[in-house]
Image: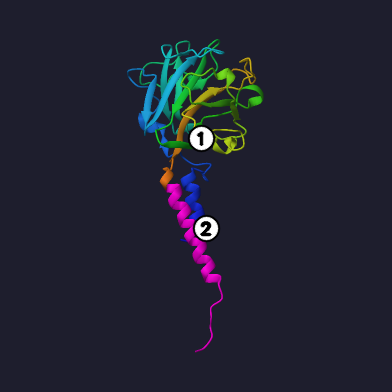
């Protein structure tokens, strides 16, 4: 194996994703049909080992209520395509089972006064996050630039107000209806080993006050994950690298061409 090939293998093993845009490897729309929510109005789902849960969150507390709403799934082809899970809380006009709902209310939004919607993702055991995708981050909010915030934690019910969040926006995603936000995470302290990711519509200050208005909404489309290498893989890689260096040195050594 050449050094370049080995470098690519090392990057893959370490979980560094070179892909930024495109469709997610784990596409949440495979869970159900277009513009519907589950007939049992579930607030949880599992797609390819990734746990998805919807909540109404009480700001500045660790209170995550699952009794005030349900997950809503969309996979539309019109208007550029809206893909993924939103959340519909009891204060929104979500429509009947099997319908498209009412406007942005079936997305992850902060449009209903006093209710903050959260979607939490749980990574599969033995994997790390490598790419995250959202959809339908369109114009709106303050200055026609809708925003969302991503948090991460090893606690299933943290106080989000105490966590460092990363804000992403319509403009940062290139102004399209869908995109990957992984490119925004590098250099922001994001921990791909965190068990849980939390998505929230809008951007907020430390006291929980919305900074970009209440017209913020989007869908959580999907993720990519990479397997965490076992410790013995690192040992084998080290041995392999040492052998390659030894072979390379031997090839560079001058040959004894003395005639007998």
Tell me where residue 160 appears, x and y as whole percent: 55, 19
Does the magenta portion include 246? yes
Q: Identify which residue, 184 or 235, lies in the foreground.
A: 235
Residue lying farthest left? 40
Q: Residues under labels 2 and 1: Cα distance?
A: 25 Å
Q: Nearer the viewer, residue 164 or 91?
A: 164
- The quadrant where residue 222 appears: top left
Q: Position of residue 220 (x, y in %)?
A: 48, 29
Residue 111: which quarter of the image? top right
Q: Give the prevailing secondary structure in the magenta stretch.
A: helix
According to the picture, the residue beneath numbered tag 1 turns out to be 192
The image quadrant that residue 228 belongs to is: top left
- Residue drawn 43% across the image and 11% down it: 68
Most foreground residue, 95 or 223? 223
Q: What's the magenta region?
A: 233-260
The image shows residue 84 at horizontal and vertical percentages of 44, 29
Callout 2: few (<14), some (14-19), or many (20+) C-alpha neighbours within 10 Å? few
Side of 95 relative to 108 (left or right): left
Farthest right residue?
143
Name the residue that disc number 2 marks: 4
Q: Secondary structure under badge 1?
A: loop
Q: Can residue 41 be seen in this snapshot?
A: yes
Query: Compared with residue 194, is residue 161 higher up or lower down, i.e. above or below?
Result: above
The secondary structure type at the circle numbered 2 is: helix
Q: Residues within 10 Å of mark 1 (few under 14, many from 20)?
A: many
Identified at 51% across, 35% down, the residue is 192
Which residue occupies the extreme bottom position in the image? Answer: 260
Residue 140: within the magenta?
no
- Nearer-the-camera pick, 31 or 53: 53
Quick check: 120 above or below 188? above
């Amino acid at each position: 194996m050449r050094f370049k090939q080995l470098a690519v293998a090392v990057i893959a093993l370490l979980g560094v994703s070179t892909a930024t845009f495109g469709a997610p490897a784990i596409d949440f729309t495979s869970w159900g049909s277009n513009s519907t929510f589950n007939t049992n109005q579930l607030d949880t789902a599992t797609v390819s080992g990734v746990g998805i849960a919807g909540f109404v969150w009480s700001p500045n507390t660790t209170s995550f209520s699952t009794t005030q709403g349900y997950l809503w799934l969309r996979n539309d082809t019109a208007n550029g395509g809206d893909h993924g899970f939103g959340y519909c809380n009891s204060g929104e006009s979500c429509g009947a089972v099997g319908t498209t709902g009412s406007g942005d209310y079936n997305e992850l939004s902060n449009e209903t006064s006093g209710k903050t919607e959260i979607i939490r993702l749980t990574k599969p055991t033995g994997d790390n996050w490598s790419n995250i995708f959202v959809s339908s981050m369109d114009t709106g909010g303050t200055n026609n630039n809708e925003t969302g915030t991503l948090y991460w934690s090893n606690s299933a019910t943290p106080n989000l107000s105490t966590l460092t969040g990363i804000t992403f926006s319509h403009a940062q995603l290139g102004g399209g209806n869908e995109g990957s936000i992984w490119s925004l995470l590098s250099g922001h302290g994001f921990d791909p080993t965190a068990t849980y990711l939390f998505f929230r519509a809008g951007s907020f200050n430390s006291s929980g006050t919305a900074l970009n208005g209440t017209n913020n909404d989007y869908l959580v489309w999907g993720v990519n994950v990479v397997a965490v290498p076992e410790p013995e893989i690192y040992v084998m890689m080290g041995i392999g690298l040492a052998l390659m260096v030894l072979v390379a040195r031997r090839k560079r050594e001058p040959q004894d061409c003395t005639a007998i």
